[in-house]
Image (spheres, rainbow, N blue to C red):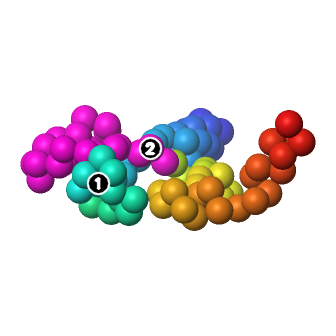
Amino acid sequence: MKAVLVIIVLVVVYMFYPQYDLIVKQSPFDEEPTLEGTGYLTEGSCREAAQAINARYFHCSSKNLWGELFGTYTSYREPERYSDPKLFEDLQGQ
């Protein structure tokens, strides 16, 4: 019984523990960010990777397996993220 409980706890931790992606822009006005690295286990290691490549404009975006499985994450690219008109239906009546 204890082994089952340990397995359940490990699965839950794996599903919800965040991993980080390193997203870099060449300039603050750049419309197309690039994904430079993925799978960092801590935000600190993601920042160290950004400093190692001398990135000035970067973002460490967190994700977890739960969000990937159920599609609750949006695209990194803003035109794709904001091009869906369904997202703004509730704002059109104002």
Residue 81 vertical placement versus 92 (above, below): below
Give the camera-side residue of 9 and 43: 43
Residue 89 on image: x %, y %: 83, 50
> How packed is label 2: few (under 14 Cα within 10 Å), some, or many (20 or more)?
some
Say which of marks 2 and 1 sits in front: 1
Q: Amino acid at mark 2?
A: Ser
| Residue 39 location, quadrant | bottom left
| Residue 48 location, quadrant | top left
Residue 54 vertical placement versus 47 (above, below): below
Q: Is residue 73 left or right of residue 48?
A: right
Q: Amino acid at mark 1?
A: Lys
> Disc 1 on helix, strand or loop?
strand
Q: CA distance from mark 2 to mark 1?
A: 17 Å
Is the C-beta separation of discs 2 and 1 under 8 Å? Answer: no
Give the camera-side residue of 62 and 11: 62
Q: Which residue is mark 2?
A: 62
Q: Residue at x 44, y 44 (%)?
A: 62
Q: Residue at x 17, y 48 (%)?
A: 55
Q: Which mark is residue 25?
A: 1
Q: Earlier in the sequence, mark 2 or mark 1?
A: 1
- Look at the image and tell me in which quarter the N terminus lies: top right
Highlighted magenta segment, given as a residue range: 41-63
Q: Is residue 53 left or right of residue 73?
A: left
- Look at the image and tell me in which quarter the C terminus lies: top right
Residue 49 on image: x %, y %: 18, 48
Give the camera-side residue of 19 and 79: 79
* Residue 24 visible from this viewpoint: no
